[in-house]
Image (cartoon, rainbow, N blue to C red):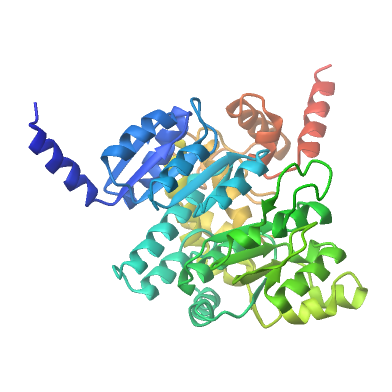
């Protein structure tokens, strides 16, 4: 047995390590996250409930906590409330189910560094954790800011050394420390949110990064979430609540899909940008805020202004500096690096051997137009990994095959008719998701409606 003195020494040594605590009731998810995040941390501990997490937190200082918002014994949100009451400012990344929007908003109110909506892939968690570490290290002068932002720009959607990606990263480095509004323009799947996070990470701002999807909510709900509301402001407003602008104070708010914002909300946002203060819905007083705004759109806002669907004055307010995110078609020289990155991270997530991508496969990948950009490439690599024991075509009209039993992406595979391959692939993904069509549709990159239609057609064929 260790003596008490030896135990204290051991704990103190652990406290000097880069340490991570993962808290989730799902053991399989904990295992996947532990494997994915271990390269970033010297020590990774896991807990399946809040009580176990509390015990670990009482003994070890953690540099980062990643916790589900709902745990078996009591909410992860409550766990963090207790930490904050004790003066513990450990950064926390919350995770929550896609339907738990309220939990995600409450997480931001507690000062969470980030929140991730399930289901997610480990690379999203790795990127979020890396940004937290970079921010903490920069505050402690452990690394230079340039190293931090460059680290952000070579993860996820902005992996690559092409001239266009290098140019984007150079612009981010120059503009991030400034308070000016930035508009990120580009097609879906080009990495606009990653660029926004890099801007915040390089900015040196003390507050958090708060992402908001402006196209996911009605105007009334969006106004309440952004600006907060007073008690009794509308039916169901049983208590006053602060908005996301309040919780982004001192930090950055990322307004994604800004082109989808209803006109009434555009008016309110313009007033906030001009006056630098927000008034909660139903409130009598405005509250000053210091928030850096980064917006993103895949629409042509200038055309929207001409068509009368977007306010001209708001457009000019947002268009202080526009960073155009390049499509994958414009940087095909980055495809080998991107494909290798996805193959490595996804194979680790799925517990599969890392494949070798041969020259023929890479050539075929470069011939594709990639309308879905980097997100589409990731989905293609994932499909091929899932079907590593089955010959398949992973791109429509392209013979991009997975060698049977070899774990390689290459040309030495037998071919099946595309319809048969598609059916086998979809059925395999449905099996992996235990028949959950919504989850399978997300993994396949298609709509639930499309998946239902295909399944009904196959059922009809079978009589």
Q: Nearer the viewer, residue 352 or 30?
A: 30
When asked about the image quadrant of residue 30, the answer is top left
When asked about the image quadrant of residue 282, the answer is bottom right
| Residue 8 % position (x, y) | 14, 40
Q: Is residue 451 left or right of residue 11?
A: right
Q: Nearer the viewer, residue 345 or 425?
A: 345
Q: Is residue 75 left or right of residue 34?
A: right
When asked about the image quadrant of residue 292, the answer is bottom right
Which residue lies at the image location 31% right of the left edge and 36% below the top edge?
A: 56
Residue that lies at the very extreme toward the right in this rendered image: 307
Residue that lies at the very extreme toward the front in this rendered image: 284
Q: Quadrant of the N terminus?
A: top left
| Residue 228 % position (x, y) | 71, 55
Which residue lies at the image location 49% right of the left edge and 74% below the top edge?
A: 203
Which residue lies at the image location 59% right of the left edge and 54% below the top edge?
A: 377
Whether residue 354 is visible here, answered yes or no, is: no
């Amino acid at each position: 047995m260790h003596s008490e003195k030896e135990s204290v020494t051991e704990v103190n040594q652990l406290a000097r390590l880069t340490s991570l605590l993962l808290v989730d009731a799902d053991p399989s998810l904990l295992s996947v996250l532990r494997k994915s995040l271990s390269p970033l941390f010297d020590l990774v501990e896991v807990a399946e409930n809040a009580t176990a997490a509390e015990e670990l937190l009482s003994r070890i200082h953690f540099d980062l906590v990643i916790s589900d918002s709902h745990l078996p014994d009591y909410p992860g949100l409550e766990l963090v409330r207790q930490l904050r009451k004790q003066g513990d400012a450990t950064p926390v990344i919350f995770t929550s189910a896609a339907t738990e929007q309220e939990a995600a908003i409450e997480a931001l109110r507690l000062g969470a560094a980030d929140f991730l909506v399930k289901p997610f892939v480990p690379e999203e968690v790795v990127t979020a954790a890396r940004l937290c570490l970079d921010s903490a290290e920069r505050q402690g002068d452990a690394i230079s800011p340039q190293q931090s932002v460059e680290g952000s720009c070579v993860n996820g959607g902005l992996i690559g050394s092409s001239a266009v990606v290098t140019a984007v990263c150079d612009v981010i480095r120059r503009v991030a420390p400034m308070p000016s509004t930035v508009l990120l323009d580009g097609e879906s799947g080009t990495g606009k949110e990653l660029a926004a996070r890099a801007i915040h990470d390089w900015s040196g701002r003390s507050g958090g990064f708060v992402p908001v999807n402006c196209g996911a909510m009605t105007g009334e709900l969006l106004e309440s979430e952004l600006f907060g509301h007073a008690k009794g402001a509308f039916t169901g407003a049983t208590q006053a609540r602060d908005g996301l602008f309040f919780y982004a104070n001192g930090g950055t708010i990322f307004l994604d899909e800004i082109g989808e914002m209803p006109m009434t909300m555009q008016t309110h946002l313009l007033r906030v940008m001009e006056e630098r203060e927000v008034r909660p819905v139903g409130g009598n007083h405005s509250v000053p805020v210091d928030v850096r705004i980064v917006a993103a759109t895949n629409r042509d806002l200038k055309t929207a202004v001409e068509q009368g669907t977007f306010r001209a004055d708001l457009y000019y307010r947002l268009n202080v500096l526009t960073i155009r995110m390049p499509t994958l078609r414009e940087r095909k020289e980055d495809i080998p690096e991107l494909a290798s990155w996805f193959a490595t991270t996804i194979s680790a997530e799925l517990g599969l051997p890392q494949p070798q991508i041969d020259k023929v496969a890479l050539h075929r990948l470069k011939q594709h137009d990639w309308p879905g950009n980097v997100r589409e490439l990731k989905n293609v690599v994932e499909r091929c990994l899932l079907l590593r024991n089955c010959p398949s075509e992973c791109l429509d009209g392209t013979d991009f095959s997975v060698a049977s039993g070899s774990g390689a992406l290459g040309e030495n595979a037998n071919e099946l008719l595309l319809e048969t391959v598609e059916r086998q692939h979809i059925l395999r993904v449905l099996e992996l998701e235990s028949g959950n069509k919504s989850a399978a549709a997300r993994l396949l990159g298609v709509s639930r409606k499309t998946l239902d239609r295909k399944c009904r057609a196959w059922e009809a064929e079978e009589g």
